[in-house]
Amino acid sequence: MVDLIGRVKSTGKVFDTTIQEVAVKADIFNEREVYKPRLVVVGAGWVLPGLDEALETMNVGETKVVEIPPEKGFGERDPKNIKTFSAREFLKQNVKPRPGMTIRVKGRLATVQKVGGGRVRVDMNHPLAGQILEYEVTIRNILEKDEDKIKALIENRISGVDSNKFKINIAGKSVEISIPTEIVLANNIQLAKIGLVSDVFSNFDFENVKFLETFERTTTTQS
């Protein structure tokens, strides 16, 4: 579990953080995000390659400032990713492009650079491509027990949930996850379960994952 602050080295602009106070000060606060130490499976590609490499050598409680070159960050800027399209293609989708706007083009996010003459020029590079980045990262905890790791994966898949309400039973190559009733009825729970199964199989050698959903009889009073 890590706390981090990601900055663009040339400007000092914060673009990523797990700390609410930092997000508010940098004007990147997102009310839908839960600000707390982030789960990272080291070596699994959950973070940028340059940060992944640094985490491999760090210990609990250690803080380090890591400089990440473009090739280990979001890549170099590629001129081939700057493309021009007819404005009519966007109007058909009820989208009115304007410079600086982020839009989706052929399944990819792009930034509108210029609009004029019935044409729209977009940059399909990542906004931070070509930038040298700096991450200030602190290791808060290293999870050792499989049960704790699975609970962390649950919180990673189901935002805002208290994983202590889930019961984890590990027996040999099987793991059973008991889901509390209020979570069973939550939106998108089936997608979250599919993602959780994928995470478990990717990070453990369990052969099967079972979900236990329990519904209690409610007593009603008849008048």
Image (cartoon, grey):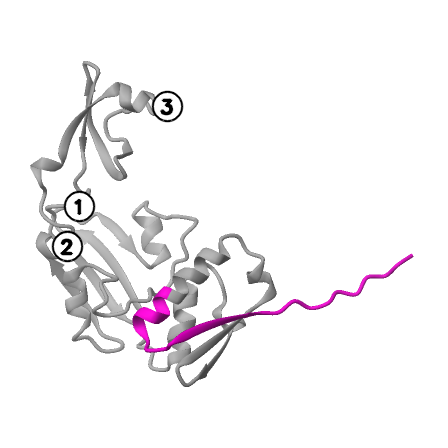
Q: Name the residue under label 3.
A: 94
* Left or right for 93, reference 106: right
Residue visible at 38% across and 80% down in the picture:
146
Residue type at tag 2 = Gly
Q: Secondary structure under badge 3?
A: loop
Q: Is residue 47 visible?
A: yes
Asked if residue 92 is among those painted magenta in the image, a careful observer would answer: no
Closer to the chain start, of discs 3 and 1, is 3
Label 1: state its secondary structure.
loop
Tell me, yes or no, if residue 140 can be seen here. no
Q: Are marks 1 and 2 in contact (CB under 8 Å)?
A: yes
Q: Is residue 141 above or below residue 38?
A: below
Mark 2 or mark 3, which has the lower sequence index? 2
Residue 128's tag is 1
Relative placement, left or right, of 161 versus 84 is: right
| Number of the label disc, if any, that sits on residue 73 | 2
Classed neighbour count for the residue bearing mark 3: other residues with Cα under 10 Å, few (<14), some (14–19), many (≥20): few
| SS of the residue under disc 2 | loop
Question: Residue 99: x, y in percent?
Answer: 23, 26
In space, the residues marked 1 and 2 are separated at their CA atoms by 8 Å
Residue furthest to the bottom: 172
Indicate which label's residue lies in the foreground, 2 or 3: 3
Q: Count how many numbered circles sit on residues in the image.
A: 3
Quadrant in the picture for the N terminus: bottom left
Q: Distance between the residues labelled 2 and 3?
A: 34 Å
The amino acid type of the residue labelled 3 equals: Asn
The magenta stretch is 198-223
Q: Residue 53 location, x and y as percent?
A: 15, 68
**Where on the picture, by quarter, is residue 83?**
top left
